[in-house]
């Protein structure tokens, strides 16, 4: 069954707001600030809650299985709906999806902050995840269209800086807020940005022009969303239940079956959600693989480091948050100052390969530096290498995927890149934690020093394997 929808095409170089005003440099700057601030909030919320989990568990009296769903509910909704939301942005209008996602995100945030039961908190996190899934690909698509040509590298670098800063600052800010104001504050801190996004979107973002009518591929959307949700759900259960758990195996089998259904549906659909002919481009297929594997090596790092600081080094939440400050500042500064120049000189393909090698070096440092030597020696150098590696590889990977599709599919490309990264993050975190446990480093509810060493070493191996894959397209001219 298909439903007819109106497609819109957004332009940002000469299209004004509803009044038809010609775009100006000031307005483009305001649009960029709004888009990257929204992405910052999305990335912030993926990590800021981690530090607050012990306080949430104690305050609400949650069991260990319930507290994991405070994180998992957001990850499942966000990762599962990114691809669908990205394509919907192409068809329904990117600014419309941006505003709708901002509203949903704010509503979910308020629900989570005011929750006094596990069900209310998890429900708020689901709404947050849905809002983030609508918001993020729409924002990136608007950025790609608003800043074409040479300006795109600079805009994407700022986007990457916001993403890196948001992911790392989440751990830092979470520790400070929980220690000072309580766990509800980690949710409320994002509300002003969401409210500003709703108010300002109509003034600074391109409205879009009416286009042809398209059919929306609901069967394909249901199949791929189910496949991603099942895959992420299975991955999240690996650390607790093991690879051979019936629940994990059933989730992975269901994901594979739904993926097969999706491919079959897309081959027959008149207007497919994901046109399979796009994958005739070797660059796109490789780029998606890079996003999955790179996401495993990158995003899992901040989860492992947050646990490492508190469990292996016995830091309090506030101390652990402050320990992440150098990572945030380094990633932010590198993305703003050096990344645009590097991308212009060697191209995004070679940039991401270099970044993954640097990321692996950071993982290996964290894996092998003795914890007894203290933070300055055992942790800080590794964190700085990780920050540079993430900055060099995250944004260029997205640029590779976006550059492999036509402008009419920028929302789809954004959703595809985000979904692949989220799937990789879930798989990587689950796999590396499971490796740490199997290495004999499990002490009660925490990982011991040997467990963290094994987990970081595995992450380094994945980063290097991803860099090797990236060399297959590194000769492509930028």
Image: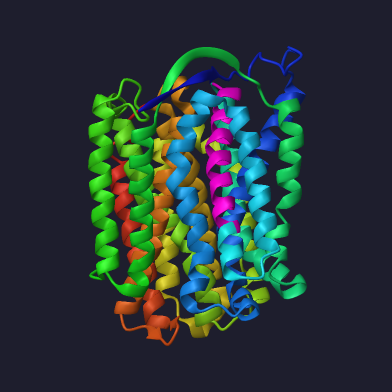
The question of residue 132 being in magenta is answered with yes
Pick whichever, 104 or 279, lies toward us: 104
Q: Residue at x 45, y 70 (%)?
A: 366
Magenta region's main secondary structure?
Answer: helix
Q: Residue furthest bottom?
A: 444
Q: Is residue 357 visible?
A: no
Pick whichever, 267 or 308, lies toward us: 267
Q: Is residue 450 above or below residue 380?
A: below
Q: Residue at x 76, y 35 (%)?
A: 199
Q: Residue at x 27, y 57 (%)?
A: 252
Pick whichever, 427 or 164, lies toward us: 427
The answer to whether residue 450 is left or right of residue 407 is left
Q: Is residue 63 above or below residue 287?
A: below
Region in magenta: 124-148
Q: Residue at x 42, y 56 (%)?
A: 425
Q: Is residue 403 above or below residue 436?
A: above
Q: Residue furthest front?
A: 1
């Amino acid at each position: 069954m298909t439903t007819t929808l109106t497609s819109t095409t957004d332009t940002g170089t000469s299209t004004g707001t509803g009044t038809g005003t010609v775009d100006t440099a000031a307005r483009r700057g305001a649009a960029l600030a709004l888009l990257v601030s929204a992405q910052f909030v999305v990335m912030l919320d993926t990590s800021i809650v981690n530090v607050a989990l012990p306080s949430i568990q104690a305050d609400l009296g949650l069991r260990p299985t319930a507290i994991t769903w405070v994180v998992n509910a957001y990850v499942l909704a966000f990762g599962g709906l990114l691809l669908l939301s990205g394509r919907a942005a192409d068809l329904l209008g990117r600014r419309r999806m941006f505003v709708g996602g901002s509203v949903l995100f704010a509503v979910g945030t308020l629900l989570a902050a005011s929750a006094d039961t596990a069900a209310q908190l998890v429900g708020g996190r689901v709404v947050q995840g849905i809002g983030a899934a609508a918001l993020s690909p729409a924002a990136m698509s608007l950025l790609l269209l608003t800043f074409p040509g040479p300006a795109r590298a600079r805009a994407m670098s700022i986007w990457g800086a916001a993403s890196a800063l948001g992911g790392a600052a989440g751990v830092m800010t979470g520790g400070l807020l929980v220690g000072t104001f309580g766990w509800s504050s980690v949710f409320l801190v994002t509300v002003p940005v969401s409210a500003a996004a709703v108010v300002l979107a109509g003034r600074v973002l391109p409205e879009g022009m009416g286009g042809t009518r398209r059919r929306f591929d609901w069967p394909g959307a249901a199949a791929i969303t189910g496949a991603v949700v099942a895959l992420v759900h299975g991955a999240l259960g690996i650390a607790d239940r093991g690879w051979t758990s019936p629940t994990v195996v059933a989730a992975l089998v269901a994901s594979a079956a739904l993926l097969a259904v999706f491919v079959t549906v897309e081959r027959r659909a008149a207007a497919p959600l994901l046109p399979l002919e796009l994958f005739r481009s070797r660059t796109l297929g490789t780029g998606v693989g890079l996003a999955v594997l790179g996401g495993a090596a990158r995003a899992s790092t901040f989860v492992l480091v947050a646990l490492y600081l508190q469990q292996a080094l016995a830091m309090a939440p506030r101390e652990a948050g402050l320990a992440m400050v150098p990572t945030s500042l380094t990633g932010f500064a590198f993305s703003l100052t050096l990344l645009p120049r590097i991308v212009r000189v060697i191209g995004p393909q070679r940039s991401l390969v270099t970044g993954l090698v640097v990321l692996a070096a950071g993982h290996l440092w964290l894996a092998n530096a003795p914890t007894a030597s203290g933070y300055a020696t055992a942790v800080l150098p590794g964190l700085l290498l990780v920050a540079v590696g993430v900055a060099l590889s995250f944004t260029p990977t997205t640029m590779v995927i976006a550059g492999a599709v036509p402008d009419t599919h920028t929302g789809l490309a954004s959703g595809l890149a985000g979904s692949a990264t989220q799937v990789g993050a879930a798989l990587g975190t689950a796999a590396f934690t499971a490796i740490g446990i199997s290495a004999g480093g499990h002490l009660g509810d925490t990982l011991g020093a040997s467990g963290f060493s094994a987990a970081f070493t595995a992450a380094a191996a994945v980063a290097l394997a991803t860099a090797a894959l990236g060399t297959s397209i590194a000769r492509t001219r930028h």
